[in-house]
Image (cartoon, helix red, strand yellow):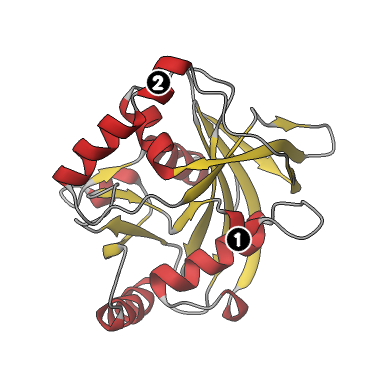
């Protein structure tokens, strides 16, 4: 399946009750698979996560979907099984940190995380805390929170740029650009100082790139991130 990179104008996701429609055999395998994952990485925590229906981008540019809640162990079991189709997508916010000299700052995930060694923009899967009282899922709020939690940077200090959806099979990245008035070198240094202060850090490091190959030797650049970089550098999208 090819990766689609689509400029969007907004996001409208509503929370609905009910667990994910996992096939019975896959659901039954969750406890055993989770136990094996914990044995391999005792730092994992089985929190709650939101998955969404296959999103639709309308003529108005708004991405729409419905969200349901399930366990993180269910998500990792689904991922380990190769993401068999079950009408759910892992939609997450991505904070595109854009430097004044035209670099994108990506996170290198730490060794204690479920995504160790993977490289992608700071962000995270949607959680119950992202559901507002009216049932709306606030992806923008989630993205800003994750930006601060992972890097120490404050979204209020940046100029908001464009909103881009990257559809990569079971993964959907809703990417918001944050333009900072600092060079890549200055931003990387600031983030590294912030990381040193974190007791439970998700990022092992950060890297400044314009293209995916700029991160060679640092880890695995996720395919959706590489596609976004290609579209950006190829002039197909602007941030």
Q: Return the x and y of residue 57 as percentages of the image width and height.
A: 74, 33
Label for residue 22?
none
Q: Judge by depth and name the residue closer to the eye, 73 or 139.
A: 73
- Quarter occupied by residue 235: top right
Q: Can residue 102 be spotted in the picture?
A: yes
Q: Judge by depth and name the residue closer to the eye, 215 or 94.
A: 94
Vertical position of residue 152 compared to residue 131: above or below? below
Residue beneath the point at 42% across and 77% down: 152
Residue beneath the point at 58% across and 74% down: 155
- Quarter occupied by residue 221: top left
Q: Judge by depth and name the residue closer to the eye, 29 or 100.
A: 29
Q: What SS does tag 1 mark?
A: helix
Label for residue 129?
1
Mark 2–mark 1 Cα distance, whole angstroms, equals 27 Å
Disc 2 and disc 1 in contact, CB within 8 angstroms:
no
Q: Is residue 27 left or right of residue 239?
A: left
Quarter of the image where the C terminus is located: bottom right
Q: Residues within 10 Å of mark 1 (few under 14, many from 20)?
A: few
Vertical position of residue 25 compared to residue 189: above or below? above
Residue beneath the point at 57% across and 67% down: 144
- Quarter occupied by residue 139: bottom right
Q: What SS does tag 2 mark?
A: helix
Q: Return the x and y of residue 37 as percentages of the image width and height.
A: 22, 40
For disc 2, the marked residue is 26
Q: Judge by depth and name the residue closer to the eye, 105 or 35.
A: 35
| Residue at the far right in the pictured view | 60
């Amino acid at each position: 399946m090819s990766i689609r990179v689509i400029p969007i104008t907004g996001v409208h996701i509503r929370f609905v009750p009910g667990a994910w429609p996992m096939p019975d055999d896959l659901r039954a395998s969750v406890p055993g698979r989770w136990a094996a994952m914990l044995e391999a990485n005792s730092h994992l925590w089985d929190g709650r996560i939101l998955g969404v229906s296959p999103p639709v981008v309308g003529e108005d540019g708004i991405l729409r979907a419905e969200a349901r809640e399930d366990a993180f162990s269910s998500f990792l079991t689904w991922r380990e099984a190769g993401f068999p189709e079950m009408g759910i997508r892992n939609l997450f916010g991505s904070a595109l940190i854009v430097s004044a000299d035209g670099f994108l700052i990506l996170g290198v995930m730490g060794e204690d995380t479920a995504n160790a060694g993977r490289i992608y923009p700071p962000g995270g899967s949607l959680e119950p805390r992202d559901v507002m009282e009216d049932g709306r899922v606030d992806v923008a709020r989630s993205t800003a929170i994750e930006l601060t939690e992972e890097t120490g940077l404050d979204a209020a200090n940046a100029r908001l740029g464009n909103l881009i959806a990257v559809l990569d099979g079971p993964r959907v990245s809703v990417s918001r650009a944050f333009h900072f008035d600092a060079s890549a070198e200055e931003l990387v240094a600031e983030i590294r100082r912030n990381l040193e202060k974190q007791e439970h850090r998700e990022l092992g490091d950060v890297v400044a790139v314009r293209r995916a190959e700029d991160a060679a030797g640092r880890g695995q650049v996720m395919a959706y991130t590489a596609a976004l970089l290609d579209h950006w550098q190829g002039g197909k999208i602007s941030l």
